[in-house]
């Protein structure tokens, strides 16, 4: 798709740029590059590096708008379940009224520095405290003897980890591996600048596991929700745990995660994707310092405004569980989110089980130490398999359901990842269309 | 300095990590890397890549705190003029009281998306409007027929520009050049991941100027305040203009800047460094789209909270000039900032001219189209030359003044860059110490 965009674009560009010789030269160079890429890599990597905008669905991202459509119009529109945009949570926060409001004055957030006494000098103390408090309450991660490193989403923290763990002067880039299906952004981020420090390998078995390599362990896994441990187990293994979804709305909390490097994000815990805020819990101080260094070099810190807001939101959640007065007033956050996910998964499984067109993975059941409920993992994404067609993404696209195809996750085209945490209207329409497809395809 | 930190750290680390074989291997690899670096590059690049924390001044950044010291204590403390932390502006924004307050509710900034109809889908429309309005008011940049791309500071935008301009499959990395003295972060950012797309060359004359290369034109220049144009002038030239300091408090606005790619930042325009917000004005849509793609890959957008706050602050500034009612109430932003910079530069030139220890560059005088005042460029940094010692940074460090040495800017050790936009107390103490040195060194 990107190659198509690039080519169409380049015709226009080249016409406009004829007057400026160096611009033209650049344009040609870029296009030759794209062409080479197309020949060399096939479609897959083109799409990864290109504009994942579905230009052929009406241009830009306009048909993918985050806002729900007015009733009656939705039936002819594209439903965008490609991104994991957590708009499901918005209605909860609206119910909370002004309880989570923050007021920020013009004289605040002026300095680059937040707390010069800690390793992460751009980490707001209030945010650090709120993170520690919430982990203690939920019991999903060990925070003792750890450094908190804040990042512009866990996406930036992932890059900071790679920078911190890969020696600058190693003769070869370090291998970055992960069992398929893996999060589609990992290869993209790892290879986007052709770094000499690290290189995406994904799921491979032809590398020397005695040499240092980094294995990404995402648990619950994105895209398929499986509960994971390291699989490569070489003596050179360095583990990075992406635990973005290890929250009680998605999976039973079985124990405090206690890994060397753990990555979390606001987007998937409270649903505040627009804040672009994540945090890492890091055992080793030298590694935490190198991560901080990377964030210093690449963005000189992280928005203080978002940290201030996030602190407030996390504290309101903790308050609601710790203070019996507020807890009686309205539903508490994780109770709401757990019920909402349970409802959506129940609807999804019901519609899938009614026919033979689709299937879903079986996910483990367990008791949650936090809620004391016993339930099966109910991930933010459905890892949906088309049982009767080979290209599930294209098939669903014909039904105006936009998902991300399995190839992006190192898997088969028979699978797609579909976000389940969008607006209720879109979710209901998704279920309606699946039901329709199932009844037609499963006579 | 970083090598020292790394070595001390590594002794401790290695002891603690003996139990875990792979961690030890990593640690050794990192240290071998550092050692190689020390031998290969000398001290200079070590310091660039290391923790620029002045560990030998009392640990961490604690002696560099952004908050001013209580009276009487300041005389024995380190004055940190190394970073361009714009805390000077804080007192102005305090005077503005609640006029720039923003209230953000918990249900806001939930989605990743801001405006899916524009190229930069994570750009808040209110922020885009405020940016355009302010540029029109000040007359410092052409905004017509341009795309606004928002970034996590202009630092991220710089990386986005490199990604957008350098073809992915070129046989060699593209040369990134800039006349010395150049901004010290440019080589750091460019080379930190050993990208195969681009490579820092700085001020060189041994590259093929007929092949595409990127020249960074910073005007007014960081560190020396000079007004610049492209200097390499090869046929392969692609220009990127860093115009972070092209605001009326620093230099007379002589015309609307009208370049292909221009980078701005909140840090230096309004003094809100903690927001981590910058914007690029980009003529070519294909380039703007690739910049957006980079920001999507590296941080999935930019904090909405900071964009909302910044919109408010920029609009309050524009209001004060466009609405005669509010303009009578208090000093307007650029008037205040221009006067404050003038006062500081007058004090600095006076103390430097009193002796023979230091000198400052002569900067151009012109009439400002915005303020209609005629004045000399008065940069955010002093590019100070020690006339009687070879290592100006070390010399000032003995007097507990922390600055950034000329070598970091591709220049001589006889120069340092000192920030002039910090807290008033620190600035006054800096002037007092310079005066003392000058009287001792210039008998």
Image (spheres, coloured by chain):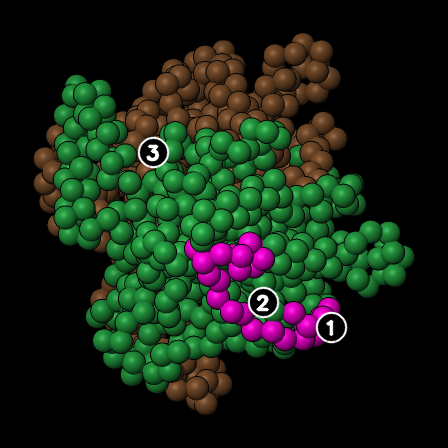
Chain colours: A green, B brown
Q: Secondary structure at mark 2?
A: loop
Residue that label 1 marks = A372
* Position of B443 relative to A21 (above/below): below
Residue that label 3 marks = A56
Q: Is residue A198 left or right of residue A155?
A: left
Q: Secondary structure at mark 1?
A: loop
Q: Any magenta on residue A354?
A: yes
| Image disc number at residue B165 | none
| Image disc number at residue A377 | 2
Q: Residue at x 29, y 31 (%)?
A: B286
Counting labels gives: 3
Chain of residue at mark 2: A
Q: Position of residue B298 (x, y in %)?
A: 41, 49
Q: Residue at x 80, y 57 (%)?
A: A320
Q: Position of residue B203 (x, y in %)?
A: 22, 43
* Position of A16 relative to A33 (above/below): above
Chain of residue at mark 1: A
Mark 1 and 3 residues: CB-CB less than 8 Å, in contact? Answer: no
In terms of sequence position, does the residue under pointer 1 or pointer 3 come before the other?
3
The residue range painted magenta reads A348-375
């Amino acid at each position: 798709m990107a190659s198509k965009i690039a080519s169409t674009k380049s015709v226009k560009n080249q016409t406009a740029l004829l007057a400026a010789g160096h611009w033209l030269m650049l344009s040609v160079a870029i296009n030759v590059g794209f062409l080479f890429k197309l020949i060399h890599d096939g479609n897959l990597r083109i799409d990864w590096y290109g504009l994942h905008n579905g230009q052929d669905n009406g241009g830009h991202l306009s048909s993918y708008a985050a806002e729900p459509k007015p009733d009656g119009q939705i039936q002819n529109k594209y439903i965008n379940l490609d991104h994991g945009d957590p708009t499901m949570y918005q209605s909860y926060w609206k119910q909370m009224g002004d309880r989570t409001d923050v007021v920020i004055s013009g004289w605040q957030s002026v300095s680059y520095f937040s707390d010069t006494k800690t390793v992460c000098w751009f980490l707001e103390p209030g945010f650090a405290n709120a993170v520690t408090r919430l982990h203690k309450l939920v019991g999903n991660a060990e925070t003792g003897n750890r450094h908190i490193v804040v990042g512009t989403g866990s996406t930036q923290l992932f890059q900071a980890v790679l920078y911190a763990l890969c020696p600058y002067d190693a003769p070869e880039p370090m291998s970055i591996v992960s069992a398929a299906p893996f999060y589609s952004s990992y290869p993209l981020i790892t290879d986007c600048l052709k770094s000499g420090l690290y290189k995406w390998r994904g799921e491979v078995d032809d590398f020397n596991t005695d040499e240092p390599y980094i294995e990404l362990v995402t648990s619950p896994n994105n895209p398929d929700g499986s509960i994971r441990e390291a699989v490569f187990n070489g003596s050179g293994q360095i583990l990075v745990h992406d635990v973005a979804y290890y929250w009680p709305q998605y999976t039973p909390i079985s124990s405090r995660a206690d890994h060397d490097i753990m990555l979390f994000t606001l987007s998937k815990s409270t649903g505040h994707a627009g804040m672009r805020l994540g945090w890492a819990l890091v055992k080793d101080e030298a590694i935490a310092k190198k991560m901080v260094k990377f964030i210093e070099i690449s963005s000189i810190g992280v928005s203080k405004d978002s940290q201030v807001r996030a602190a407030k939101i996390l504290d309101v959640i903790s308050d609601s569980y710790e203070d019996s007065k507020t807890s009686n007033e309205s539903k508490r956050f994780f109770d709401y989110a757990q019920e909402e996910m349970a409802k959506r998964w129940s609807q999804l499984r019901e519609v899938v089980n009614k026919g033979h067109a689709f299937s879903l993975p079986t996910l483990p059941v367990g008791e949650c130490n936090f809620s004391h409920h016993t339930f099966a993992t109910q991930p933010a994404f459905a890892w949906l398999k088309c049982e009767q067609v080979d290209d599930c993404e294209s098939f669903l696209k014909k039904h105006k359901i936009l998902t991300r195809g399995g190839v992006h996750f190192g898997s088969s085209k028979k699978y797609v990842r579909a976000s389940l945490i969008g607006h209720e209207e879109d979710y209901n329409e998704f279920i309606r269309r699946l039901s329709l497809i199932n009844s037609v395809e499963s006579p």
